[in-house]
Image (tube, rainbow, N blue to C red):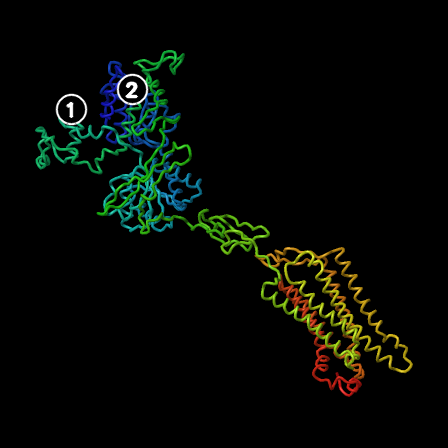
Amino acid sequence: MRFALHKINSLDLLPHLTLGFQVYDSCTGLHQELDGTLKMLTGQREGIPNFSCKNLSPTVSIIGHSTSTFSIINAHMLGLYGYPQISYLSTSSILSDKTLFPSFFRTVPSDAFQSKGLAQLVLYFGWTWVGLVAVDDDYGRQGIQFIKQELLRGGACVAFTEYISPNNLEHISHVTKIIKGSTAKAVISFAKDTDQVVFMEEMLRQNVTGKIFVASEAWSISNLFTMAKYSKLLSGTIGFSFHSSTIPGFREFFNSIQPFSTRQDPWTKIFWEKVFECKFFDQTILTDSWNKSRLCTGNESIESIQNIFYDISNINAAYNIYNAIHVIAQSLHDMQTCQENKGPFRNGNCSDISFKPWQLSHYIQNVKVKLSNGRELFFDQNGDPPAMYDIINWQMNTDGTTRHVKVGSYDTTQANGNSFLINTSALIWGTDQQQVPVSVCTPSCLVGFRKVLRRDLPVCCFECILCPLGQISNKTDSLDCFKCPWDKWPSAEKDRCLPKSREFLSFEERMGMTLASTSAFSSLLPISIVGIFICYKNTPIVRANNFTLSCILLMSMSLCFLSSLAFIGYPQPEKCLLRQVAFGTVFTLCVSCILAKTFMVVFAFMATKPGSSLMKWVRPRVSYMIIALSTSLQLVLCITWISFAPPFPTDNTQAQPGIIIVECNEGSPTAFWCMLGYLSFLATISFTVAFMARRLPDSFNEAKFITFSMMAFLSVWVSYIPASLSSTGKYTVAMEVFAILSSSWALLICMFIRKCFIILFRPDMNSKEHLMGKCKI
């Protein structure tokens, strides 16, 4: 304060005015604080309410107190007279109420800013499960409630809220046990350093470790805890301290202090004796303790005792006092430079040297002071300055003690919302990994999971549930899972949607290639048999089996084998439209030929009876009529089907999760089953008639082979029905292709393999005698 006044008085800021000061010591007593305030208002050695001595130099402003409780008492009384009061260290948010304290200002931010900043600092590091501890007084309760509100607003949760009283050791022990047993790693402590001492001693006694303390400004740079015994507990502590800056010229002024250079200044000698642990000779006080003390010479060097206790380069309280003096000086300057008729008061008046205290309060409210660090100091409507704090990190020295390192700042004046400026690389935590500690009730749910709140617990305590089938969550701590689009499917981690694989029976895959090769190879066998029949056309066994009808049957069998190829490959619209029609038509042709053979066997036997009129039914054209009529009915059914409900390709996303089955929708399932039903009906008739004719004479014994062939044919297709219903995707198509090939092979083997064997390898059995009954075919 002396340095600031000396500097101002040496400038031309206040011409014809000199600033002086009076200092009163409250001695931490409220009654003495009130008495000193009244004395300043009265201007005499005794305080007299509502009286002011006009003969003395006027008191323009009062600076103080450092403690909020004392400042509140002063502000109530000074507000009645409109005397401006500027505190350099009182932070209680109550003092921001202008209705109660109209003339109160301060050069230190309100606790409301600090509480909000501390809460945001905790959220900045991702700590959502936080413990709160505060001193059990107005300072602690108000500060911690502000912090709690900001934490809850920011989505964090409070594990516990405890208040400590230095005089209640039992309760302090109880609070320490709560902190030790809590899963919360981050603990905000809103208390003064002197209140923390007993609390920290109990923490050491109970060996509390693994906690990160977040300190309020009242103890964040306290030297009471820099000793090595606290380093294990407090190393890594982070907190706020009031922003400070170097005061230009103060170091030189400080170093030039001499105890004998000023008169009527008891503080310099007291300071000197305290710092150098000596005594100035005073013959009026001769005691044993004085005789044992070292004498002060006045020549001791202040520069030699500059350590962490007397580091004048960064003293927060001194910087705030320095700024308070400059606020008063600038306000007086603004008052002096007021232009008549342009003043702020009624009728544009200005105030003169005999101004009223409330008039100076008006100027202080609107003052703007350029600080030495380039920032601007002003007051908002509540008398609070812009809030800026230094962020302090407690780091361990090599000798085990701790030091306070500035690692960032918190500035509420930043318009872009970037209030925090933190050098994370400069941070040193108390953990072995030197990574940001984690303080959460439940670790974050990873992508692919969703949060489910647990009953009777805060929202920060939850369970992580894996997203159900077909759903994803692409961010941590997601509350819901989301379905993928119809053509996409979750990845294995369920964090993104990937295109579904498209499945169909392809020529390129092993199963499709095998079926296609089998189909192509099999289609050549009936043609080969036709060639054999042509070569041996005039032999008895070929002539006895109706050469023309057999060739038609063999060619239809070849087409049956080839029809299976329409089911392999990508389901094109044309392929979907014709494949079932082609399958149904060629198989009907094949079965119709067998049906014609069956009837011809029966008619031939019955025509041999004397007086039979069925001879005309044994003619070849009857066979052709049966074939044409049976095939035409199937063809009409298929044409009707594709005319009114044609099959079409479709993407089936329901049959198999994660796969799009590209398949042919049959259009009308009824028409499809009618087609198969009609085919089965023809085969059943053939089987029934052939079965009834199986015991006819040997020359007509082809009925036996027809019986076996129809039995095999029907067995294959009866087995296909449950197999196709129980399979999905390409396997359903593969089952139908397999059924086509199997039934075609059954017909081929039962009807023609034995005949080919006789023709090629047993020509002795290919005779008329053998066919007439000597041997069986």
The location of residue 713, given as percent across then percent down, is: 71, 72
The quarter of the picture where residue 14 lies is: top left
- Identify residue for label 2: 60
Q: Quadrant of the N terminus?
A: top left
**Amino acid under label 2?**
Val
The location of residue 412, given as percent across then percent down, is: 38, 33
Q: Nearer the viewer, residue 102 or 578?
A: 578
User: On the rendered structure, is 250 left or right of 546?
Assistant: left
User: On the rendered structure, is 340 left or right of 607?
Assistant: left
Q: CA distance from mark 1 to mark 2?
A: 25 Å
Dot placed on the residue nearer the N-terminal end, 1 or 2: 2
**Amino acid under label 1?**
Thr
Does any portion of residue 97 appear in the rendered image? yes
Count of numbered badges drawn on the protein: 2
Residue that protrudes farthest toward the front in the picture? 535
- Identify residue for label 1: 262
For image coordinates 84% across by 72% down, the residue present is 622
The location of residue 623, given as percent across then percent down, is: 82, 72
The quarter of the picture where residue 378 lies is: top left
Does any portion of residue 135 appear in the rendered image? no
The mark closer to the camera, 1 or 2, is 1
Q: Quadrant of the C terminus?
A: bottom right
- Is the residue 749 above or below the residue 138 in the image? below
